[in-house]
Image (cartoon, grey):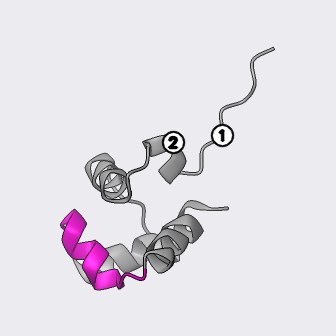
Amino acid sequence: MTFPEHLYQLRVCKRLLQKNVAKEIGVALQTYQRYEYGTSEPTLSKLIALADFYGLSLDDLACRELPEKE
């Protein structure tokens, strides 16, 4: 799953509107929409705000899987 897909899924599962998430993390609605559409990426501070808002780690928010060590 891509980051934009994950953002969309998180928001829909919590039955939130884009404008509500945008307000919570301190960005304009259009800015947040660009995150979900994949046309823009959030800054580190906004990634942290999103992770805090959803109660996730940055790795989980970004759908990052660490490779297994050999």
Q: Earlier in the sequence, mark 1 or mark 2?
A: 2
Q: Which residue is mark 2?
A: 59
Between 22 and 31, the one nearer to me in the picture: 22
Q: Is residue 23 magenta?
A: yes
Q: Secondary structure at mark 1?
A: loop
Residue at x-position 75% and y-position 18%? 69
Between 17 and 45, the one nearer to me in the picture: 17
Q: Is residue 14 visible?
A: yes
Q: Which residues are magenta?
A: 15-27
Residue at x-position 26% and y-position 80%? 20
Apparent side of residue 64 relative to residue 55 in the rendered image (left or right): right
Residue at x-position 67% and y-position 62%? 1
- Residue 7, position as x, y percentages in the image: 48, 67
Marks 1/2: CA–CA distance? 7 Å
- Residue 55, position as x, y percentages in the image: 38, 52
Are discs 1 and 2 less than 8 Å apart at CB? no
Q: Is residue 27 visible?
A: no
Apparent side of residue 10 relative to residue 70 in the rendered image (left or right): left
Q: Which residue is mark 1?
A: 65
Whether 34 is drawn above or below 42: the answer is below
Q: Which residue is farthest top?
A: 70
